[in-house]
Image: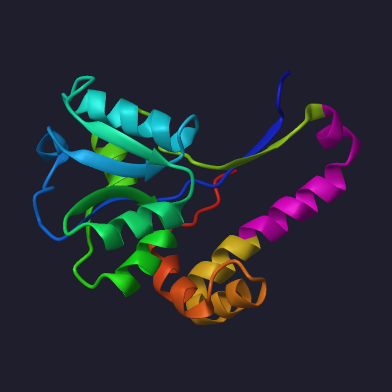
């Protein structure tokens, strides 16, 4: 079906992180490494495979150990001295709170942008059916206006926004306050 209205909400919130070393300096440095990650069968897996290929790595050059939840990846970090992982925010911030030597090695968004191929690394979007948009134009316009205002609010009022994130039980406010600046929350209509 055709979609008259789409609202994209891309994030720079997926990162390659490293605990216990500084061996990851670029995509090529991942050759021969094991990466712990979540998101098999969804955007993170497809993005990782695409970026590995674009940066010259072939199947078998990297081993990916898929976990069902980011908390399992963080648990793996506790069990090993050296770990490379692909994690989204706010779990990067959570893990940094537990492991002070955890470093952000690569941003998937920045790596994607560097390819300069005319596309964006988008991990979430809001799609409205044409019929709904045509039958509810005022409601849709109001929603999009509030959505844009919400995006602006969280970026301009990080501490206050983090308190709301905590109140709604998404993550603790202190974690949200550290993570929000790394989430690249934007509203593109």
Residue depicted at x 81% and y 36%: 133
**Side of 153 relative to 129 (left or right):** left
**Side of 146 relative to 51 (left or right):** right
- Locate the C terminus and report the quarter of the image it occupies: top right
Residue depicted at x 79% and y 46%: 140
Residue depicted at x 58% and y 80%: 163
The quarter holding residue 77 reads: bottom left
Residue depicted at x 23% and y 73%: 100
The quarter holding residue 134 reads: top right
Residue 30 seen from this side: yes
Viewer-side residue, 88 vs 149:
88
Does the stretch in magenta take in 135? yes
Residue 120 seen from this side: no
**Side of 149 relative to 101 (left or right):** right
Where does the image place residue 95, in percent across and percent down from the top left?
34, 65
Q: Is 71 situated above or below 62?
A: below
Counting the numbered discs, the total is: 0
Viewer-side residue, 73 vs 10:
73
Q: How is the image coloured?
A: rainbow
Where does the image place residue 124, in percent across and percent down from the top left?
55, 42
Residue situated furthest front in the rendering: 79
Residue situated furthest right in the rendering: 135
- Locate the N terminus and report the quarter of the image it occupies: top right
Q: Is 152 situated above or below 73?
A: below
Where does the image place residue 102, in percent across and percent down from the top left?
23, 64
Where does the image place residue 56, in percent across and percent down from the top left?
16, 24
Segment tinted magenta in the rendering: 131-148
Give the main secondary structure of the magenta stretch.
helix
Does the stretch in magenta take in 120? no
């Amino acid at each position: 079906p055709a979609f008259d209205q789409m609202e994209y909400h891309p994030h720079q919130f997926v990162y390659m992180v490293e605990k216990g070393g500084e061996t990851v300096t670029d995509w090529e440095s991942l050759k021969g490494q094991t990466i712990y990650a979540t998101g098999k069968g969804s955007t993170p897996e497809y993005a990782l495979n695409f970026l590995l290929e674009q940066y010259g790595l072939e199947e078998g050059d990297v081993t990916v150990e898929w976990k069902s939840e980011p908390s399992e990846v963080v648990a793996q970090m506790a069990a090993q001295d050296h770990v490379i992982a692909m994690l989204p925010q706010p779990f990067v911030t959570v893990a940094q709170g537990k492991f002070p030597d955890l470093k952000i090695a690569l941003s998937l968004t920045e790596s994607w942008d560097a390819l300069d191929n005319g596309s964006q690394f988008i991990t979430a979007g809001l799609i409205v059916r044409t019929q709904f948009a045509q039958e509810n134009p005022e409601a849709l316009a109001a929603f999009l206006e509030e959505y844009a205002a919400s995006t602006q609010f969280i970026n301009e009022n990080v501490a206050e926004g983090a308190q709301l994130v905590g109140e709604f039980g998404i993550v603790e406010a202190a974690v949200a306050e550290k993570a929000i600046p790394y989430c690249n929350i934007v509203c593109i209509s």
